[in-house]
Image (spheres, helix red, strand yellow):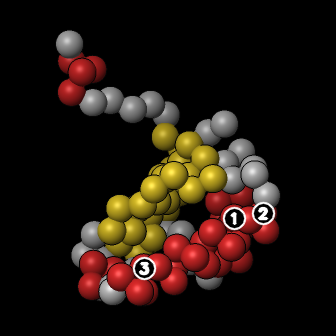
Amino acid sequence: MPKYIIEREIPSAGNLSVLELQQISQKSCCVLTEMGPKIQWLESYVTADKVYCIYIAPDEQTIREHAERGEFPANAINEIVTMIDPTTGE
């Protein structure tokens, strides 16, 4: 199944409290449960003004549906084609 990176523009995301991040996570998980096993959230990275999320889903529309149901921004959705790391150069 394809893997996607979602860019979410959230002003001051890096200043969100632990409680606020917990609430966002819980909301996302509730929506994922409602949508069934066709979509999975792997992890997210929080920066100063954005959150980058890694998801597995059958298509971009499924990612957009999750964002709409959860009322999360999805400013850019890109399918991950491949991954590289330091061992790629060996």
The mark that comes first in sequence, 3 or 1, is 3
- Where residue 73 appears, x then y in whole percent? 53, 76
User: Image point 57% across, 56% down: which residue?
Assistant: 41
Q: Residue type at mark 3?
A: Leu
Mark 2 element type? helix
- Kind of residue at badge 2: Met
Q: Are marks 2 and 3 in contact (CB under 8 Å)?
A: no
Q: Nearer the viewer, residue 27 or 85?
A: 27
Q: CA distance from mark 2 to mark 1?
A: 5 Å
Dot 1: what SS? Answer: helix
The image shows residue 90, relative to residue 19, as above or below, that is above
Estimate how packed mark 2 is, as few (under 14), some (14 to 19) or many (20 or more) residues with alpha carbons within 10 Å: some
Q: Which residue matches tag 2?
A: 35
The amino acid type of the residue labelled 1 equals Leu
Residue 74: which numbered mark, if any? none
Who's the residue at 27% across and 30% down the image?
85
Can the viewer see residue 12? yes
Image side of residue 56 versus residue 7, left or right = right
Check disc 3 and report the residue beneath it. Answer: 21
The residue at which mark 1 appears reads as 32
Q: Earlier in the sequence, mark 2 or mark 3?
A: 3
